[in-house]
Image (cartoon, rainbow, N blue to C red):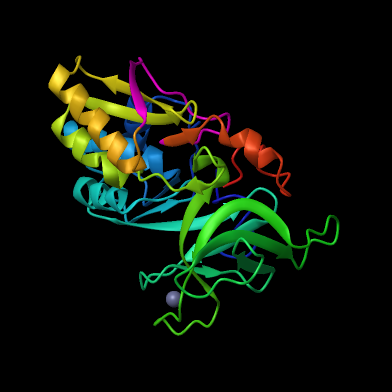
């Protein structure tokens, strides 16, 4: 394409762009990147992570690359670090959703995400419906100020986020410190309460360094059972399998059965996103809440 597409067309001059289907394999993606030698790369954080790890393993560099822009999934600090090691560049993340478009963009100051308050009213609410203060985590509720065709008023989008403080950059737009993800990525306790499992890449990257694991996904199957799906270069020893069970149990913080399942690959969602933790029982719980968006293919 001659430009970066509809989002920037007519408003600023860009260079050309190329697009590859995210469902292509990591090797196909890396070969394409080496051919294209892009200045900017935009894709899901999990795709960047796989490509950067592959680049490190196979000693490929992208000499012209200046920035990696991500959206659509939670961006972990360990993915930023892997990106620095692989390509020597920083990542910038954007928070968006199909229903309302761009919600917030990451600030170069490192303080979090500035909300696009010019066109959205974004509220972060606690379980009582009261507004959260800086440092508190709550539900993301959005009112779209410019969608006259289909107004969304106090629309609960299904994500959780932490309210940020004042940013040192000088912009006065309100801030989100971090975006935590969607309700269905929460671990569901027997009493219906939910907690954030620390299965994100940060927590498990130590595994990947020590063990021959290419990819993993933790799935809550019931209140008593979680399944760890592993894509491994070679079978793990009994000690290694035990180590995984111990870490998974620690992350959940309670006694739970952990089953390991070796698979050839872990598929992405229909929109190409990857979830390192998923609860198969939370969707039923969430479907009974006020939000109708949560069963849509991942909006974020
Ligand atoms: Zn800022």
In this figure, what is the number of numbered marks?
A: 0
| Residue numbers of the magenta segment | 256-276
Q: Is residue 247 above or below residue 42?
A: above
Q: Position of residue 117 (x, y in %)?
A: 63, 73
**Quarter of the picture for ligand 1?**
bottom left
Q: Nearer the viewer, residue 284 or 146?
A: 284
**Residue at (32, 22) in percent of width and height:** 230
Q: Nearer the viewer, residue 25 or 64?
A: 25
Q: Position of residue 23 (x, y in %)?
A: 48, 27
Q: Position of residue 266 (x, y in %)?
A: 41, 23
Q: Position of residue 110 (x, y in %)?
A: 35, 69
Residue 154 visible from this viewpoint? yes
In this image, 187 relative to 183: left or right? left
Residue 59 visible from this viewpoint? no
Q: Nearer the viewer, residue 186 or 141?
A: 186
**Residue at (55, 64) in percent of width and height:** 104
In this image, 225 relative to 161: left or right? left
State which quadrant residue 89 falls in.
bottom left
Question: Is-magenta flag for residue 68?
Answer: no
In this image, 295 relative to 229: left or right? right
**Residue at (48, 32) in percent of width and height:** 22
**Residue at (36, 30) in percent of width and height:** 256
Q: Is residue 122 above or below residue 257?
A: below
Question: Is-magenta flag for residue 262?
Answer: yes
Query: Main structural element of the magenta stretch: helix, strand or loop?
Result: loop
Q: Quadrant of the N terminus?
A: top right
């Amino acid at each position: 394409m001659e430009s970066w597409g509809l989002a920037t067309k007519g408003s600023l001059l860009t260079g050309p762009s190329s697009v590859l289907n995210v469902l292509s394999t990591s090797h196909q993606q890396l070969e394409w990147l080496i051919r294209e030698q892009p200045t900017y790369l935009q894709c899901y954080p999990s795709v960047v992570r796989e490509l950067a790890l592959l680049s490190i393993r196979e000693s490929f560099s992208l000499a012209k690359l200046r920035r990696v822009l991500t959206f659509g999934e939670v961006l972990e600090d360990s993915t930023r670090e892997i990106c620095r090691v692989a390509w020597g560049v920083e990542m910038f993340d954007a928070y968006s959703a199909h229903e309302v478009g761009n919600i917030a963009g990451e600030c170069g100051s490192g303080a979090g995400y500035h909300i696009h308050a010019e066109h959205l009213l974004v509220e972060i609410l606690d379980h009582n419906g009261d507004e959260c203060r800086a440092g508190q985590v709550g539900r993301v509720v959005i009112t779209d100020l410019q969608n006259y065709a289909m107004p969304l008023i106090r629309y609960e989008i299904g994500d959780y986020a932490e309210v940020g403080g004042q940013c040192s950059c000088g912009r006065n737009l309100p801030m989100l410190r971090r975006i935590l993800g969607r309700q269905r990525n929460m671990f569901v306790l027997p009493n219906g309460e939910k907690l954030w499992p620390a299965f994100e890449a940060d927590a498990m990257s130590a595994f990947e360094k020590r063990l021959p694991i290419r990819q993993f996904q933790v799935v809550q199957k019931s209140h008593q059972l979680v399944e760890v799906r592993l894509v491994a270069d070679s079978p793990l020893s009994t000690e290694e399998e035990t180590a995984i069970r111990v870490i998974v149990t620690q992350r959940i913080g309670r006694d739970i059965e952990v089953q390991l399942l070796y698979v050839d690959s872990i598929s992405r969602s229909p929109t190409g996103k990857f979830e390192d933790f998923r609860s198969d029982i939370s969707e039923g719980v969430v479907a009974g809440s006020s939000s109708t968006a949560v069963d849509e293919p991942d909006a974020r």
